Amino acid sequence: MTNSSTHASARLISAAPSGAAKPAFLGGTPICADLPSTRWPPLDDATERRLVEVYRSGGWSFNGPVEQEFCQQFAAAHGAQHAVFMVNGTVTLEAILHTLGVGPGDEVIVPALTWPASAMAALYVGATPVFVDIDPGTLGLDHQLVEQAITPRTKAIMPVHLYGGMPDMDALLALGQRRGIAIVEDCAHAHGGAWNGRGLGSLGVAGSFSFQQSKTMAAGEGGIVLTNDEALAERLYRYKHIGYAAGSKQGQAQVGPPAGLICHNYRATDFQAAILCEQLKRLPQRAAQRDVNAQWLTAQLQQIPGLRAQQRGRCASPQSYYCYMFTYDPTAWAGATAAQLRLGLKQEGVPATLTYGSVYRHVLWNVPATAFRIHGDYRDARGSACRVSEEIGTQRTLGFPHQVLDFQRGDLQKIVDAVARLQHHAADLARLEA
Ligand SMILES: *Cc1c(COP(=O)(O)O)cnc(C)c1O
């Protein structure tokens, strides 16, 4: 081979689009081998000091000073008047339904695509979850289908801000108002998100957040309810604190809970509150930056054939991402499955996640068919009425965890390059054993 031909072929390779180089799943060099760590939750000295302070105070529970500080600040950050801190974001949902008086014979509308807890909350109070399909853009409740699913038994509608996204909250709030049905927001993925300047969790009658290990504010476990309804806040507080009124000292209850309000112990501790107080300081800045980065990613990924980002909330201000999700059109990807795409991304060094799938198909959803309902006339081959959740939400959606949205532009660009490279090799990807 002569010098000049070597030179020519080298030039040819470097002039080729980066996507054309051999992808990692075919033995090429991964594009994203040196991305920053996605270790979560984050550790810092200020939090460590606060935890030691709580430890040495000996006052670990029972509405301690740090819990009060956190409740006040978390409520303020979301424009709500009251916050009630609990052990996790599952019992918070149950507590809301219970204290609203939802019970046997009642129905609660939930999206087909969400984590099972959203629907289990209805079961815990003896009510019937009614699954309604999602909108293919926002991946949140389709409000027109919600309206069709309402019956005289419907007592609550539970929009879930899935991955941080937002269904049309104006439409759902107006619907709830018109039909006299409580709107209960599941904000487990949406800390710091806002709709038209109003904090999520403060829009409906009550909103629930989770602080489980993976969430964008994480204390191992934990949950909180926001509400602007003082009477509801009082019932919620009693419910999680075995009947004690807010402000009454342990062992010194003056007046018991209202008749029929069977209470529980769902108290969290000042340890969790201390961790969350520190994380809350960084939340607004971090949520805003993630939103900016998500919009940049969307602009880039949109240029790759067959990709569409989860639609940003119509009035998001900001959208607070738990995951950055996108749907893809398999016909533009040689029929590759979401699992194959995810594996291809993993080989390139990109952390990627699939959706939960429809709740009523989840491996943990071990519920007799008589105890829930799936709304809709359409039936697919598996007898499911929630077509969008089944086809788009479950089979054609994947994305990146929130830590990725904390990356610098250069690292985000590498991720875009990795996706573009996989698109270029979609035919091979579709043969990958996932
Ligand atoms: C995590 C989560 C919950 C429940 O929160 P836990 O704190 O884990 O009990 C509820 N809804 C959704 C959508 C979630 O992702």
Image: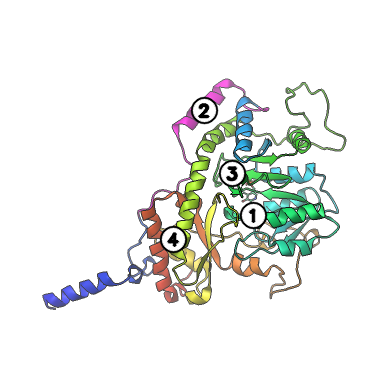
Residue at 35% over, 53% down: 34
| Residue 378: in magenta span | no
Q: How many marks?
A: 4
Find the magenta span and give its range.
Answer: 34-63
Q: CA distance from mark 2 to mark 4?
A: 37 Å
Residue matched to label 2? 50
Dot 1 corresponds to which residue?
115
Q: Is residue 67 above or below residue 13?
A: above
Q: Which residue is mark 4?
A: 346
Helix, strand or loop at mark 3: loop
Instruction: Give whichever of discs 1 and 2 has the lower sequence position.
Output: 2
| Residue 237 showing in the rendered view | yes
Image coordinates of residue 93 in percent, x first then y, are 71, 46
Where does residue 135 sit, x and y in percent of width and height?
64, 64
Q: Residue furthest front?
A: 196
Instruction: Say which of marks 2 and 4 sits in front.
Output: 2
Residue 353 appears in the picture as rendered: no
What residue is shown with label 3? 212
- Asked which colour scheme the image uses, the reply is rainbow
Callout 1, which amino acid?
Answer: Trp
The disc labelled 3 sits on which kind of residue? Gln
Residue drawn where x is 56% and y is 49% of the image: 317
Q: Which one is earlier in the sequence, the residue at label 3 or at label 1?
A: 1
